[in-house]
Amino acid sequence: MLTRIDHIGIACFDLDKTVEFYRATYGFEVFHSEVNEEQGVREAMLKINDTSDGGSSYLQLLEPTREDSAVGKWLAKNGEGVHHIAFGTADVDGDAEAIRSKDIRVLYDEPRIGSMGSRITFLHPKDTHGVLTELVTSAKPSADHSSAEH
Ligand code: V0V
Ligand code: CO
């Protein structure tokens, strides 16, 4: 079951400048940052709020590490802006399979490693009314705890 907005992914050309914009304008601080070589991104997670399922919601600021990455290609075509949304779930495997059975393309056979050790997969934007949609199960045992019991 999808139980929260885990994050909104925002593509940017310069991560440091964009982080500074979100800090100076809204007061959001960096909760976590990392490089994900497989995905070709350098990212910063700005925590916005905790959620009723024991997880949290973030903004995920994304700078490409290479031009031929998903975010690099998207930026070259569209410029900066909202790149994807991510729903949180206690069971990314089960939810991805349930969605795949509805003839919606799930991009990975098995979830891959995402931010903060989470497990992630994506739905093809051409099958979701134009929105690149990610499913996330966070690594932290306490997050997703309450939804796992239901
Ligand atoms: C592409 N399209 C999009 C889109 N990206 N539509 C909406 N939102 C997006 N973000 C459209 C594009 O305009 C084309 O439509 C069509 O899809 C094919 O796009 P393309 O430019 O030819 O690119 P592809 O097909 O090579 O790649 C598109 C996909 C790729 C979605 C397959 O971006 C992908 O594999 N994404 C999943 C991985 C990802 O995004 N990683 C970065 C975030 P027209 O022009 O034909 O109509 S990593 C992350 O979120 C992490 C680590 C985390 O959360 O922890
Ligand atoms: Co993401």
Image: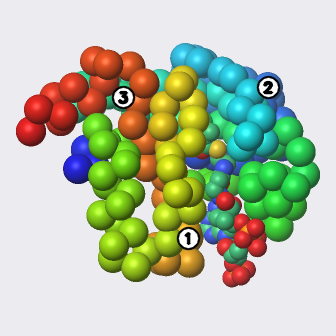
Which residue lies at the image location 61% right of the left edge and 54% below the top edge? Answer: 82
Q: Residue furthest right?
A: 67
For label 2, the residue is 16
Q: Residue furthest front?
A: 109
Say which label, 3 or 2, has the lower sequence index: 2
Residue type pointed to by label 2: Asp
Pair 1/2: label in front = 1
User: Label for residue 112?
Assistant: none
Which residue lies at the image location 87% right of the left edge and 55% below the top edge? Answer: 68
Q: Nearer the viewer, residue 119 or 31?
A: 119
Does mark 3's beta carbon lie closer than 8 Å to ligand 1?
Answer: no
Which residue lies at the image location 57% right of the left edge and 35% below the top edge? Answer: 114
Does mark 1's beta carbon lie closer than 8 Å to ligand 1?
Answer: yes
Residue type pointed to by label 3: Ser
For label 3, the residue is 56
- Give the Cα distance between marks 3 and 2: 23 Å
* Residue 7 against residue 130 in the figure, above or below: above
* Residue 126 against residue 86 in the figure, above or below: below
Q: Nearer the viewer, residue 94 or 127?
A: 94
In the displayed structure image, the side of residue 101 where residue 39 appears, left or right: right
Q: Residue furthest left?
A: 150
Q: Position of residue 134 (x, y in %)?
A: 49, 52
Q: Dot 1, crowdedness within 10 Å: few (<14), some or many (≥20)?
A: some
Residue type pointed to by label 1: Pro
User: Label for residue 125?
Assistant: 1
